[in-house]
Amino acid sequence: MTTDWRMPGEWERHQRTYLGWPQWLEDPKKGQKDPAQIAFAAVAKAIAEFEPVTVAANPDQVDKARAALHESVEVASIPQNDSWFRDTGPTFVTRDGDNGKEIAGVNWGFDAYGGLNDEHELDDEIARCICKQADIDLIEGPMVLEAGSIHVDGEGTLISTEECLLNKTKRARNPKLSREQIEGNLKKLLGVTKIVWLPLGLYADNDTTGHVDNLACFAAPGKVLLAWTDDEKDPQYERSREAKRILEAATDAQGRKLEVIKLPLPDPLSKTAEEAGESARNKGGKGNENGKVDNEDEDDEQADEEEEEEDDDDEAPKAGDRMAASYINFYICNGGIVMPALGQEPADSRAQKVLEDTFPDRKVVAVPTRKEKPTWLRRNICRMTFIAWLNWPAAETGYLQEVLRVAFRKVSSLYVSKPNLLAVEGHLPRFQAKPLLILPERKGSAGARATHQRTRRSSRSACQGAQWMPLATWRIQACGTS
């Protein structure tokens, strides 16, 4: 006889951990290493001390990942747009079957956090790929969900935030589903009977729209760790107190009162210009000898501002913006805890002490990740598709793809942080009078729009007299350059 599927608590015994291998959109300069890859390699090594680890990388990154990772870490080839496997990978569930414990993976829909970026087709297949490689059954989830938006105690209780899962704005994951329908799906597939809803996630967590895994998580049945600040001037102050009030007033699926353990936040961390992808070029000009920004063409800037009016609510990140940094997003593995060290003392040591007291039977390992988080944010914000701009009104789809393939073969590299005009002259059919321009898609993420504006300005000299029009959108992989 079998029982229903159940999502186990994170502290239950693992067979293996899966991680995604991050990669820059642009190649680092010669001799420069990707800080995200350095951090992920350290995380993988730390987890591998406690349990088997598989790092999945894009096919063209497998050799690089193998060279960077500890020999104890397994490397697999799985195509992906992003590396956040907690959100894109399967949600593993178990049940007791006639022949012992059965394991399956739930394949939720993935739409890049409610449309944060346009490229996520590969991410939507990651759960299926992992389940196939692991030879376990796949259960198709009936809605969009990132596992970072939920946390369970393994005994029937789930916590989440209304800001994320019940969001009905333009970043809504399931705008047509009611609260009751969403709860029904979670209960059916994860074996939960009680859901505790917190209103908001961590302050400034705009990329995920308030994932609970950055605010609160179960440490054991009946015990919840909560991101905390005593600074009344911090915007997080009221959020944490309201979450604490709701948690302490709630009971779990077994009727127990919840114990809340405060996990202090670091002092607010701000993005650097590099982390925000910001520079003088982002502002549409170039720095002069005094470091000031000179706009090259006020008329073009005004036109760009008019184009931006429809997207006023989706501004590009800036240096000085607050990061959604907390210690709640630690990882529980067999006999260990792997936590982020954010490079801030005494906050890092204070958080480690709380986790050591909360998990006395586990070794707590702090891994420096200050460079990893911003790089992930930048990749999510600046990931973009490309538009082919041609000076003729129409083309056969197959022919355009061939033109793009030729163009990309002649361009050695693409730099998102240094978007230059890609004028591919002499490599198109003879009747093509004007050069082919590859410009970032404006109607995508905030970073994509900002890059589009910068590229327009830098390409004016080559575009004079041309009547450009958007013709088709292509991912780089579709152009034979992956």
Image: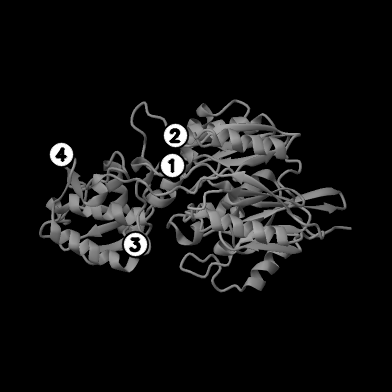
Q: In this view, does 438 lie above or below 337?
A: below
* Residue type at numbered disc 2: Pro
Where in the figure is residue 202, as x and y percent of width and height?
Answer: 54, 54
Q: Nearer the viewer, mark 4 or mark 2?
A: 4
Q: Nearer the viewer, mark 1 or mark 4?
A: 4
Separation of residues labelled 4 and 3 (CA atoms): 34 Å
Separation of residues labelled 2 and 1 (CA atoms): 8 Å
Q: Residues within 10 Å of mark 3 (few under 14, many from 20)?
A: some
Disc 2 to disc 1: CB gap under 8 Å: yes
Secondary structure category for the residue under label 2: helix
Q: Quadrant of residue 286?
A: top left
Where in the figure is residue 459, as x and y percent of width and height?
Answer: 18, 51
- In the rendered image, which residue does mark 4 sit on? 290
- For marks 1 and 4 on the same chain, the one whose residue lies earlier in the sequence: 4
Secondary structure category for the residue under label 4: loop
Which numbered disc covers residue 35? 2
Pick the quarter of the image with the C terminus: top left
Separation of residues labelled 4 and 2 (CA atoms): 31 Å
- In the rendered image, which residue does mark 3 sit on? 443
Where in the figure is residue 282, as x and y percent of width and height?
Answer: 27, 49
Q: Which of marks 3 and 1 is in front?
A: 1
Q: In which quarter of the image is residue 314?
A: bottom left
Secondary structure category for the residue under label 3: loop
**Position of 30 compared to 286: left or right?**
right
- In the rendered image, which residue does mark 1 sit on? 375
Closer to the camera, 118 or 146?
146
Disc 3 to disc 1: CB gap under 8 Å: no
Q: How crowded is mark 4: few (under 14 residues within 10 Å), some or many (20 or more)?
A: few
- For marks 2 and 3 on the same chain, the one whose residue lies earlier in the sequence: 2
Q: Quadrant of residue 195?
A: bottom right
Q: Is residue 343 above or below residue 318?
A: above
- State the colouring used for the structure image: one colour
